[in-house]
Amino acid sequence: MNYPSLMLQLAQNALVLLIAPLLLGWTNQCRAWMQNRTGAGVMQPYRNLVKLFHKDAVLAHNASALFRYTPYILLACMWLAAALVPVLATDLPLSPAVDVIALAGIFALARVFISLAAMDIGTAFGTLGARREMLVGFLAEPALLMVLFTASTISGSTSLITIVETLAHKSFVLYPSMVFAAVAFVMVMLAENARIPVDNPSTHLELTMIHEAMILEYSARHLALVEWASALKLLAYSTIGIALFVPWGIAEVGNWGALPLAVALLFLKLALGGAGLAFIEALSAKMRIFRVPEFMGTAFLLAVLGLLTHFLLEAPA
């Protein structure tokens, strides 16, 4: 057994779990600065989690086991997805399992459970949020898969490790197809993480909320786990974007001396990505739910254009 690789895998698993709320807090704080507000601070998500874990959970009398266990399943799925992405190195023990289609399946599994849990109590808000969540997921998944297939055709594999090694550890090549894919990925990321313009994570208005509508019945530790899972999902999408479009700096197989630089570059990329996400949200307004299909259709079209551009301009004759 390769104990250094195993220890690095465990360290990466702990790292993504701990810094996920920090990325969420940094994004929210950057958005507050751009809107000329003071903001709650980058550590506010940690304070919220501590406060929720110290409260007593309140459950509806008709809540089933599915409702009670979904927060744990949701956190496990998002933690697994974030831990599988190569954020530090490409030679970790879980590397053979990092398939882009499997990652999309993990996100879909988590979506199914949170939607079922939202409908389990039988409230109008929960059912409304679940229906909207499945609508967004139904539209976002094809666009996400087309983005992943664009990167897969360049590397010749659906393994995220192979994609990183192809794009980052070989001769530098400009891929016009990845530009279309990057724009589509950002649009999918906004939709999947309930961010503006698709959803507003801080609203409780009946006509606009999607994610918040599904978790209104959760409290205390259950709500803390759901919020932590949401932060992990944002981190997972951010690290997938890094692996696909800016993978430079991720340590190569066996290059342990490059790990300090990989950690520093990871935090730099996440900081820039969080600021960029906040910039998009500061310039955007929440769109009507009926405009979401147009938004996601545009993302799918851009992803398809990226794939076609690869076959027309980049693929060898």
Image (cartoon, rainbow, N blue to C red):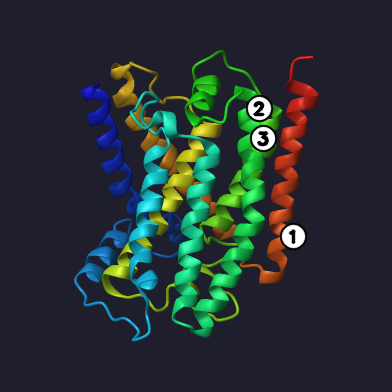
Sooner in the amino-acid sequence: mark 3 or mark 1 = 3
Does residue 225 appear to the left or right of 113 in the view shown?
Answer: left
Q: Nearer the viewer, residue 156 or 16?
A: 156
Residue occupied by mark 2: 153
Label 1 is placed on what type of residue?
A: Glu
Q: Quadrant of the N terminus?
A: top left
Q: CA distance from mark 3 to mark 1?
A: 20 Å
| Residue 25 coordinates in the image, percent (x, y) | 37, 56
Residue occupied by mark 1: 294
Label 2 is placed on what type of residue?
A: Thr
Callout 1: 10 Å neighbours few (<14), some, many (20+)? few
Sooner in the amino-acid sequence: mark 1 or mark 2 = 2
Residue occupied by mark 3: 179
Q: Is residue 108 visible?
A: yes
Q: Residue at x 33, y 56 (%)?
A: 42
Q: Residue at x 59, y 47 (%)?
A: 186
Which quarter of the figure has residue 208? bottom right
| Residue 280 coordinates in the image, percent (x, y) | 57, 54
* Up-down relation of residue 16 to residue 28 (above or below): above
Does residue 219 appear to the left or right of 146 in the view shown?
Answer: left
